Amino acid sequence: MLATALAVVLGAGRCSSTSTPTTLAPTPPVAPSVALASVSLSQGSVVGGNPVTGTVTLTAAAPTGGAAVTLSGADPLSVAASVLVPAGAAVASFGVSTRAVGATMAGTVIASYGGVSSSAAISVTRPTVATASFGVTGPTESDTCTIADGGNTLDCTFNGSTSTAPGTIVAWDWSYGVAGTFAQTTSGPVLTLPAVTCSLLPPPPLPTGVLWFTIVVTLKIHDDLGNVSAVLTQNGARVLPQGACGY
């Protein structure tokens, strides 16, 4: 009996043990996948030749390095190949160009990111009034002209190709001047090397500290339906004498 009791006691001792609780490491949160939520345009209709603004929106903030959303636009629209949504942001804007049209046309912008595509439509219409629009471009930079050919021309270009009208534009009336004013009418939108004389400028010398003169350029357009635009004036361009006309 004593041996049996001892065996039971020893057996009980061998079966008892101390267990250590297991601690599970927390599972790190899974970053949400980011995809395109939508693309939209700032307006539903635009007169051809005028720009609009597009906006892409993601389902969550863009990851490190940003999200390059692919863009495409069918005629009469044009867009950049992509727009970058900055890291940490969910929205980005981009420009949409349109061309002048002879009748109302539908245009569509398509955006894609993260396996999701979305589109936005706009109606591009022909203009109802004549509107003059132009830019001045110099040989090396915008809004700059230099005196050339001994004072007989301006080395710059006036470009009115962004002008619009209900009909076909047939005449571009240009004027330009500093002290004296000159005028030319062209049958196309571009005036290259506008003709001048030294009377364009005030008598030399240049005032102290002055390197150029401000030139005022205006444009008025006519179309074949009899529409005439208001005169558009630009006074932000410069003329550099470049040693001509006594300077």
Image: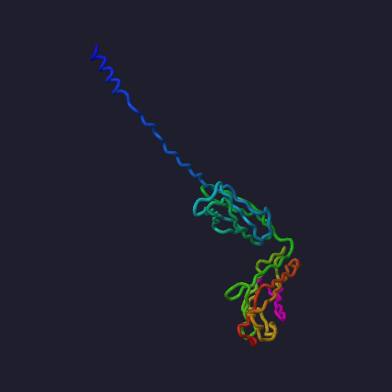
Check the image and name the residue furthest to the left.
Answer: 3
Q: Which residue is drawn at 68% across and 76% down?
A: 215
* The one of 194 and 239 positioned closer to us in this rendering: 239
Q: What stretch is highlighted in magenta?
A: 173-190
Residue 208 seen anywhere in this rendered image of the structure: yes
Residue 70 in the figure: left or right of residue 225:
left
In this image, 17 relative to 187: left or right? Answer: left
Q: Which of 31 and 226 is in front in this view?
A: 31
Q: In which quarter of the image is residue 235?
A: bottom right
Query: Which quadrant of the rendered structure holds the C terminus?
Result: bottom right
Q: Quadrant of residue 100?
A: bottom right
| Magenta span: chief secondary structure | strand
Q: Nearer the viewer, residue 224 or 31?
A: 31
Q: Position of residue 234 (x, y in %)?
A: 69, 71
Quadrant location of the N terminus in the rendered image: top left
Q: Residue 57, position in %: x, y?
A: 58, 50
What is the x, y in percent for residue 219?
Answer: 71, 72
Q: Position of residue 64 (x, y in %)?
A: 49, 52
Q: Which residue is at a point 57% across and 50% down the rendered structure image? A: 90
Occupied quadrant, residue 71? bottom right
Q: Is residue 24 above or below residue 151?
A: above
Say if 172 sits above or below 48 in the image.
Answer: below
Q: Is residue 171 visible?
A: no
Q: Magenta segment: does it hold 75?
A: no
| Vertical order, 177 against 19 (above or below) | below
